[in-house]
Image (spheres, helix red, strand yellow):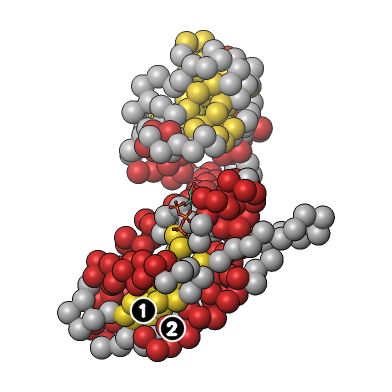
Amino acid sequence: MRLIGIFRDSGYTVENLELFRGADTLAAALALADCEVVQLTPGERIEDAVRARLYIVLSGVLEVETDGHAGTSDGSVTRILPGESVGEQSVLDDAANLDAVRAVEDTRLLVIESELAWELIDQSNAVARNLLRLLSFRIRAANALLRRRQKLGEFYRQLSLNDTLTGLYNRTWLADMLPKIVGRARAQGSPLALLMVDLDNFKKFNDTHGHLIGDAALCAAANVIRDGLRPSDFAVRYGGEELMAVLPETTAELACMVADRLCQQVREAVLFSDMRVPMPHLTACFGVAVLGPDGDEMSLIEAADAALYRAKEAGRNCVSV
Ligand SMILES: Nc1nc2c(ncn2[C@@H]2O[C@H](COP(=O)(O)OP(=O)(O)OP(=O)(O)O)[C@@H](O)[C@H]2O)c(=O)[nH]1
């Protein structure tokens, strides 16, 4: 950052500066006459960025990396054009941090020391008003950015809890939520059922029809499970071709009825709509378990797994408790 003179000799006028819009420009020009004018080369940052000072762009362009100083930048930048300023907030709260500001091209800045900025505010309602307007604009922009980040955060959170192939909840979700669902059922003394679902002979299915049709079959089975449940139930991809349904407020009898219905629907599922090739045959086994009086999430999963094993032993394409 190179000192190139003072405002009085710089050839620039107050009229084009946002901060002085509607203000007594003569008085402002007088007050600013001895202020330094500095030059930044492309990429250069403001030196002495920890000192609370107001910088007005006279020519060139500055770029502010959003939250760059907090190390949380998301890559978005704001451009500060001629007539606009940076550092207003630093002057107001005396907490400067302008190291995220850098020149895009050769840029000339008018430097207003904090004390003088306060004098200008004290002397001119128009300057105070302009400053308020500027800050309100910055707050709105910061709020919009926060909302965008919140949405993005929610999007990524969802992404981390859902299986990408089937869209069902994944193991991360299960590890977090099943203990809570079990805890709630125990606290309320309400029944809780769990269905463990495993596609039959899926290795052979893949070998025969190829992995892509295997994926489509897995998705079709996942859709059957998800669409066949109540809104208060949860469908999870437990592992490779193993799915799971968590059914709160559900007795063993009811869970068996649900499993029977889903088993039939998987059997009848349309895996793809290409009529030129014969429809592959897909079936699944269902293991049903309910939460015992002293049970926890582990024993519930183990019981459903054991029931699933019995269904496989019984010849597949069936439900076992
Ligand atoms: N297409 C596809 N296949 C998968 C996926 N995840 C797991 N598999 C396959 O599922 C098959 C599971 O095979 P096994 O565990 O031997 O079980 P199975 O052949 O279904 O036999 P049973 O369970 O005893 O009926 C493996 O060949 C895996 O490669 C997936 O995301 N897509």
Above or below, 162 against 82 in this view is below
What residue type is disc 1 on?
Val
Q: Position of residue 139 (x, y in %)?
A: 50, 51
Q: Marks 1/2: CA distance?
A: 8 Å
Q: Is mark 2 within 8 Å of ligand 1?
A: no
Residue 190 disc label: none
Residue under circle 2?
A: 256
Task: Evaluate whether residue 143 shows in this view.
Answer: no
Foreground residue, 268 or 294? 268
- Residue at horizontal 36 percent and vertical 70 percent from the top: 310
Do tag 1 and tag 2 residues touch (Cβ < 8 Å)?
yes
What residue type is disc 2 on?
Cys
Query: Which part of the image, by quadrant, shows the C terminus?
Result: bottom left
Task: Evaluate whether residue 288 shows in this view.
Answer: yes
Above or below, 189 against 244 in this view is below
Residue under circle 1?
A: 321
Horizontally, residue 45 falls left or right of residue 29, namely: left
Q: Position of residue 247 (x, y in %)?
A: 41, 78
Foreground residue, 42 or 235? 235
Above or below, 297 against 146 in this view is below
- Residue at horizontal 63 percent and vertical 41 percent from the top: 21
Horizontally, residue 237 falls left or right of residue 148, namely: left
Outermost residue on the left side: it is 294
Q: Position of residue 7 (x, y in %)?
A: 54, 20
- Assign a secondary structure to mark 2: helix
Dot 1 or dot 2: first in sequence order is 2
Q: Position of residue 271 (x, y in %)?
A: 67, 61
Foreground residue, 271 or 29? 271
Above or below, 122 against 311 in this view is above
